[in-house]
Image (cartoon, helix red, strand yellow):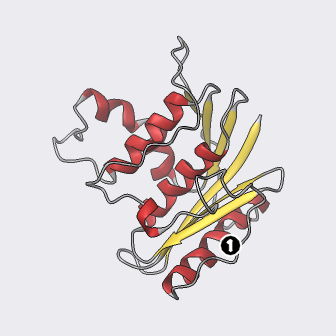
């Protein structure tokens, strides 16, 4: 099983510079940022990038301190899809493009994806690493600098430099960019398992 911790950072929520990061428990990692966004966008982007960076049949476990990102990716998404991408009250789903992109990435990934909640800022080594990388990426995006945090991934593993540019973080109203990380797979078992650790 591949285990990856994700985190997002927003320097002034909403509208401040954002950073996202994932840290694989094998030591590899990636991060990136954008000049403005929200904490929710940063958290969801971290999840999306972690899924894209870990294609294949091996089960993927994503540990995050954001219950919002976990529930958007593994619970609420099913009801929203049934309701035509509307909330229970009939309103629009916030951050729809990112949530749909995560849903597609999970559906296209041959191996299952599970999510686990971890308490943030409580000494979890990989959560702390992802938090630090996301914060650095947000500060560098704010300052107009490319992130100096290096990933152990090949340059093309995330579709470019290993970093999300501002253009890679979709606004809630624009469609998410298509990624060809794995062919679509039809299977009888659910692809997402929520494993909440409180």
Kindly give the residue lying farthest to the right in the view shown.
Answer: 26
Q: Residues within 10 Å of mark 1 (few under 14, many from 20)?
A: some
Foreground of the two, 27 or 62: 27
Foreground of the two, 30 or 114: 30
47, above or below 60, in the image: below
62, above or below 182, in the image: below
- At mark 1, the secondary structure is helix
Whether residue 167 sits left or right of residue 190 in the image: it is: left
Residue 62 visible in image: yes
Mark 1 highlights which residue? 132
Residue 197 x/y as whole percent: 64, 43
Residue 78 x/y as whole percent: 37, 30
Residue name at image x 29 percent, y 53 percent: 174
- Occupied quadrant, residue 1: top right
Foreground of the two, 140 or 79: 140
Residue 195 x/y as whole percent: 61, 35
Kindly give the residue lying farthest to the bottom in the view shown.
Answer: 143
Total labels drawn: 1
Residue 195 visible in image: no
Residue 129 x/y as whole percent: 73, 66
Residue name at image x 32 percent, y 60 percent: 171
């Amino acid at each position: 099983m591949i285990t990856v911790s994700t985190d997002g950072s927003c320097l002034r929520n909403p509208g401040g510079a954002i950073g996202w990061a994932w840290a694989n428990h094998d030591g590899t990692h990636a991060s990136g940022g954008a000049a403005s966004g929200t904490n929710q966008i940063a958290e969801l982007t971290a999840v999306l990038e972690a899924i894209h960076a870990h294609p294949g049949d091996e089960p993927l476990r994503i540990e995050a301190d954001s219950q919002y990102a976990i529930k958007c990716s593994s619970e609420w998404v099913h009801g929203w899809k049934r309701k035509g991408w509307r909330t229970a009250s009939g309103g629009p789903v916030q951050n729809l493009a990112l949530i749909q992109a995560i849903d597609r990435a999970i559906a296209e990934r041959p191996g299952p994806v599970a999510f686990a909640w971890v308490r943030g800022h409580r000494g979890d080594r990989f959560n702390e690493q992802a938090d630090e990388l996301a914060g650095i990426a947000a500060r560098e995006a704010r300052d107009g600098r490319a992130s100096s945090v290096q990933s152990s991934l090949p340059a093309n593993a995330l579709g470019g430099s290993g970093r999300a540019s501002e253009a890679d973080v979709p606004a809630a109203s624009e469609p998410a960019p298509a990624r060809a990380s794995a062919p679509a797979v039809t299977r009888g078992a659910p692809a997402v398992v929520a494993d909440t650790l409180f």
